[in-house]
Image: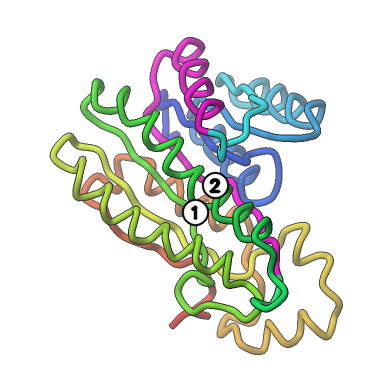
Amino acid sequence: MNLLQDKTAIVTGGSRGIGAAIVKKFAAEGAHVAFTFLSSEEKANALAAELSSAHGVKVRAYRSDASNYAQAEQLVADVLKEFGTVDVLVNNAGITRDNLMLRMTEEQWDQVINTNLKSIFNLTKHTLRPMLKAKGGSIINISSIVGVGGNAGQANYAASKAGVFGFTKSIAKEVGSRNIRCNAVAPGFIETEMTEALDDKTKESYLANIPLKRFGKGEEVADVCVFLGSDMSAYVSGQTVSVCGALSC
């Protein structure tokens, strides 16, 4: 359908999992995509080459740590030099460092907050200038239903993802008059490398609480991101869309 025809998007953490699904879906919908990775350069470049060839769009992989302010600034500068503009930003980079609060270290707390929350500040700040110049843009922040309901052993992760909601609403109000939209997506349990590592008993306990009785797919999160990045959502801003099979109802 080419819903993102000729738009340029930055996707952080785009080499695997939900991020890779978003990159693939955006390219299939006609977007030029710059995505970041931290390891496995060969795999990231192979994905970029594959998508460029398959869909006739420009896809580039950049080694960049979204939680590092200077690297985020350089990334946006490099993308502007290569692509000329940024129409859509997907803040997807995220990690977990689970532990009970009494055992959680300062390092585990800081790593999660920096990667999951500070990274969104970094990329949004540096992307806003070209969006303001273009008088338009869409920022999509990937949060989690854990940020809505919390989860034992994930105080750091829940805090970081809850922070995304407040950040999203604030940016939507701050730059809405410049035709820049900001929304959040809150996935539930999605089939990734993390869920594949779960044993059958744990999977069954999770599925018992999901009304749709299955894990979601990365492509289903990506579909929502396509909608939010496209002109179909031109009057949608400051919202959180849950992709969780009714788990958070």
Q: Quadrant of the N terminus?
A: top left
Q: Residues within 10 Å of mark 2 (few under 14, many from 20)?
A: many
* Above/below status of 125 relative to 219: above
Amino acid at circle 2: Asn
Identify the mark at residue 142; answer none if there is no mark: 1
Residue 188 position in % (x across, y down)? 57, 69
According to the image, label 2 marks what residue?
92
The range drawn in magenta is 69-98
Q: Quadrant of the C terminus?
A: bottom left
Q: Residues within 10 Å of mark 1 (few under 14, many from 20)?
A: many
| Residue at image location 49% in from the left, 59% down from the top | 143
Q: What is the secondary structure assignment of the residue under circle 1?
A: strand
Say whether residue 79 is magenta: yes
Give 209 or 5, whichever is nearer the viewer.
Answer: 209
| Residue at image location 62% in from the left, 51% down from the top | 18
* Above/below status of 141 relative to 129: below
| Residue at image location 65% in from the left, 54% down from the top | 95
Amino acid at circle 1: Ile
Give 4 or 22, whichever is nearer the viewer.
Answer: 22
Residue 241 position in % (x across, y down)? 40, 63
The single residue placed furthest to the left in the displayed view is: 177
Circles 2 and 1: CB distance less than 8 Å?
yes
Say whether residue 83 is magenta: yes
Q: What is the secondary structure assignment of the residue under circle 2?
A: loop
Q: Earlier along the polypeptide chain: callout 2 or callout 1?
A: 2
Residue 15 position in % (x across, y down)? 69, 38
Identify the mark at residue 108; answer none if there is no mark: none
Position of 166 with respect to 189 (left or right) is left
The single residue placed furthest to the top in the displayed view is: 81
Residue 105 position in % (x across, y down)? 69, 64
